[in-house]
């Protein structure tokens, strides 16, 4: 069984390898995902670590509030947000079902 951890207040210079090495001292790390800004590609200072349940519990207790790269880490179990059903959204509106009425 695995757990997904939220890791916040990361230094912007942190790499996925840095985070993997930090968490690996507490258990088996399955994946690391650092989040970047969609437009600029710059790091946003948080990410997610997926690891075995026992290691995740140990890492959360040991690393939440710990100093890393001059910053105080925030580590807790990631909250799962329910995904919305349906299409991609968007569109232009347009009143009656998006139908266009032509005038002659």
Image (spheres, grey):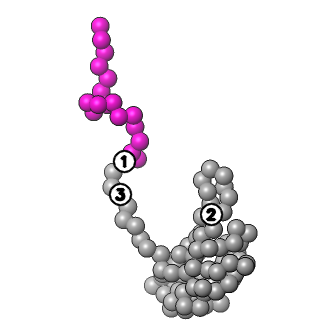
In the rendered structure, find residue 84 and report the number of the disc placed on it: 3
- Disc nearer the start of the sequence (1/2): 2
Q: Give the residue at x 58% y 70%.
A: 47
Q: In the image, is 96 to the left or to the right of 74? A: left
Q: Quadrant of residue 60?
A: bottom right
User: Dot 2 surroundings within 10 Å: few (below 14), some, or many (20 or more)?
Assistant: some
Which residues lie in the magenta part?
Answer: 87-104
Discs 3, 2 touching: Cβ within 8 Å: no
Question: CA gap, disc 3 to disc 2?
Answer: 24 Å
Question: CA gap, disc 1 to disc 2?
Answer: 28 Å
Q: Give the residue at x 62% y 73%.
A: 9
Question: CA gap, disc 1 to disc 3?
Answer: 9 Å
Residue 21 at what x, y percent from top left? 69, 82
Q: Main secondary structure of the magenta part?
A: loop
Does the magenta run of residues contain 94? yes
Residue 54 at what x, y percent from top left? 51, 91
Q: Give the residue at x 29% y 31%.
A: 95
Residue 24 at what x, y percent from top left? 64, 86
Q: Give the residue at x 41% y 71%.
A: 80
- Disc nearer the start of the sequence (3/2): 2
On-image quarter of the C terminus? top left
- Secondary structure beneath dot 3 equals loop
Residue that badge 1 annotates? 87
Residue that badge 2 annotates? 44
């Amino acid at each position: 069984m695995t757990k997904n951890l939220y890791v916040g207040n990361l230094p912007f210079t942190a790499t996925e390898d840095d985070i993997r090495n930090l968490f690996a001292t507490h258990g088996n790390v399955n994946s690391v995902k650092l989040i970047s800004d969609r437009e600029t590609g710059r790091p946003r200072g948080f990410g997610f670590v997926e690891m075995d349940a026992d290691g995740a519990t140990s890492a959360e207790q040991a690393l939440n509030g710990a100093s890393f790269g001059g910053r105080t880490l925030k580590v807790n179990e990631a909250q799962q947000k329910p995904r919305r059903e349906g299409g991609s959204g968007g569109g232009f509106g347009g009143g009656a079902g998006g139908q266009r009425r032509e005038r002659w």
